Amino acid sequence: MVRVTRWDPLRDMITLRQAVDRMLDETFARGTETRGTGAWLLPMDAYITDEAIVIRADVPGIKPEEIEITLEGDTLAIRGEIRREENSQRKYVLLERPTGKFERTLNINTPIDHESVEASFKDGVLTLTLPKAETVKPRQITVKSG
């Protein structure tokens, strides 16, 4: 049975308003504590090659051993905390660098070779290389004649 719903422009406007509010919240909340988990969202870049998925994230002011990375099934989670240098003598006039807990959880929709995952850290940039499982790597198939 097909259900027909009457168009309500007011309902659609409220949805648009909520989407804009959410976008603005996410844009201006970066670097500060946010609602929910109390952690800010870790910004990152990701790209795909024939062999792997590569993820790069900026985590300045943190040591590699302070980053927690877990890959469970198809869920990748990156967590840590950037601490502000405590000094009661300072009177800040500007505080823009993010501090506090951060986390990012991604669903990887490509089968990954869990045993070959690598993480490296250089100059405040975390690089994760998630090799694709053999079953999803592109294969060249030759055509035989006759």
Image (cartoon, helix red, strand yellow):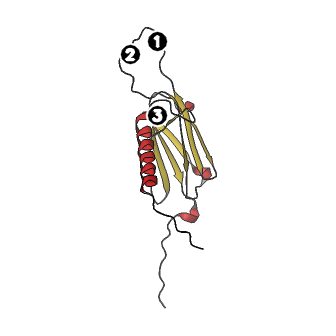
Camera-side residue of 35 and 80: 35
Across and down, in percent, residue 53 comes to 49, 53
Q: Residues within 10 Å of mark 3 (few under 14, many from 20)?
A: many
Q: Are marks 1 and 3 in contact (CB under 8 Å)?
A: no
> Label 3: which residue?
59
* Disc 1: which residue: 87
**Dots 3 and 2: beta carbons under 8 Å?**
no
The kind of residue on which mark 3 rests is Val
N-term-proximal mark, 1 vs 2: 1
Where, quadrant-wise, is the N terminus in this rendering?
bottom right
Tell me the crowding category of disc 2: few under 14, some 14 to 19, or many 20 or more residues within 10 angstroms, Cα based: few
Q: Give the labeled residue for mark 2.
A: 92
User: Which element carries disc 3, helix, strand or loop?
Assistant: loop
Looking at the image, the residue that sits furthest to the bottom is 146
User: Farthest residue in the left direction?
Assistant: 93
Cα distance, mark 1 to mark 2?
A: 10 Å
Q: Is residue 1 visible?
A: yes
Label 1: few (<14), some (14–19) or many (≥20) C-alpha neighbours in 10 Å: few
Q: Nearer the viewer, residue 140 or 2?
A: 2
Q: Secondary structure at mark 1?
A: loop
Q: Give the residue furthest to the right.
A: 72
